[in-house]
Image: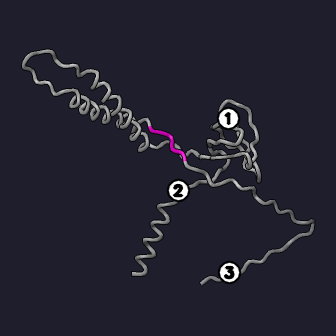
């Protein structure tokens, strides 16, 4: 019983945490800052207290870690996110077109399903089509980066140092 509780507690803790990634050279990031609008750049270098970045088609520049607000790292294209976006956009466009085209047939004795049925069936068809397109096109996925903390710089004197490591192996 106790082990079941531990497993459940670990699962809840793990599911409540967002996947966070670190900022590494070569990563594409989006960031905002105190005096900066959202920018999408590629990281060239991660120094102790700053990032050296380059925007697409621009010149490299340095951003201090203390000036950064939210930092998001690109995880690449996700076909599942693309499918979701396509489903929503296709459903919305299909519903709109269904409402616009359901002005009535104008013939006597003909079956007229009404604007609601036409809009719903058009939304379903548009959603399926949009999901199929979205799977192939994909959508870029972004994740919050771990907070950028200044890295401590440790400077040793000019004297050489020796370190020892002990380990047990069986």
Distance, label 1 to label 2, CA atoms, is: 27 Å
Q: Is residue 67 above or below residue 117?
A: below
Magenta stretch: helix, strand or loop mostly: strand
Q: Would you name the residue on which mark 3 appears?
A: 167
Q: Is residue 123 above or below residue 6?
A: above
**143 vs 132, nearest the viewer:** 143
Residue 93: where, in percent of width, then height?
A: 35, 28
Q: Is residue 70 above or below residue 153?
A: above
**Circle nearer the N terminus (1, 3):** 1
**Circle nearer the N terminus (3, 2):** 2
Quarter in which the C terminus is drawn: bottom right
Determine which quarter of the picture holds residue 128.
top left
Residue at image point 32% right, 27% down: 96
**7 vs 24, nearest the viewer:** 7
Residue 59: where, in percent of width, then height?
A: 74, 32
Q: Would you name the residue on which mark 1 appears?
A: 55
Determine which quarter of the picture holds residue 31.
top right
Residue 75: where, in percent of width, then height?
A: 54, 46
Q: Is residue 99 left or right of residue 161?
A: left
Question: Dot 3 lies on which element?
Answer: loop
Q: Is residue 118 above or below residue 8?
A: above
Q: Is residue 73 left or right of residue 1?
A: right
Residue 18 image label: 2
Question: Which of labels 3 and 2 is toward the front?
Answer: 2
Question: Which of labels 1 and 3 is toward the front?
Answer: 1
- Callout 1: 10 Å neighbours few (<14), some, many (20+)? some
The span shown in magenta is: 138-142
Residue 73: where, in percent of width, then height?
A: 59, 46
Tag 3 near tag 2, CB within 8 Å? no
């Amino acid at each position: 019983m106790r082990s079941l509780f531990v497993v459940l507690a670990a699962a809840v803790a793990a599911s409540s945490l967002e996947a966070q990634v670190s900022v590494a050279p070569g990563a594409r990031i989006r960031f905002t800052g105190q005096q900066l609008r959202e920018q999408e750049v590629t990281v060239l270098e991660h120094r102790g207290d700053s990032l050296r970045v380059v925007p697409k088609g621009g010149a490299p520049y340095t951003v201090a870690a203390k000036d950064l607000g939210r930092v998001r790292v690109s995880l690449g294209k996700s076909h599942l996110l693309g499918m979701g976006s396509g489903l929503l956009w296709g459903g919305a466009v299909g519903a709109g077109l269904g409402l616009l085209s359901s002005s009535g047939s104008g013939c006597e004795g003909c079956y007229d399903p009404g604007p609601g049925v036409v809009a719903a069936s058009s939304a379903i068809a548009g959603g399926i089509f949009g999901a199929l397109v979205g799977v192939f096109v994909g959508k870029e996925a972004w994740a919050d980066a771990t907070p950028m903390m200044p890295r401590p710089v440790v400077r040793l004197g000019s004297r050489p140092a020796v370190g020892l490591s002990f380990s047990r192996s069986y």
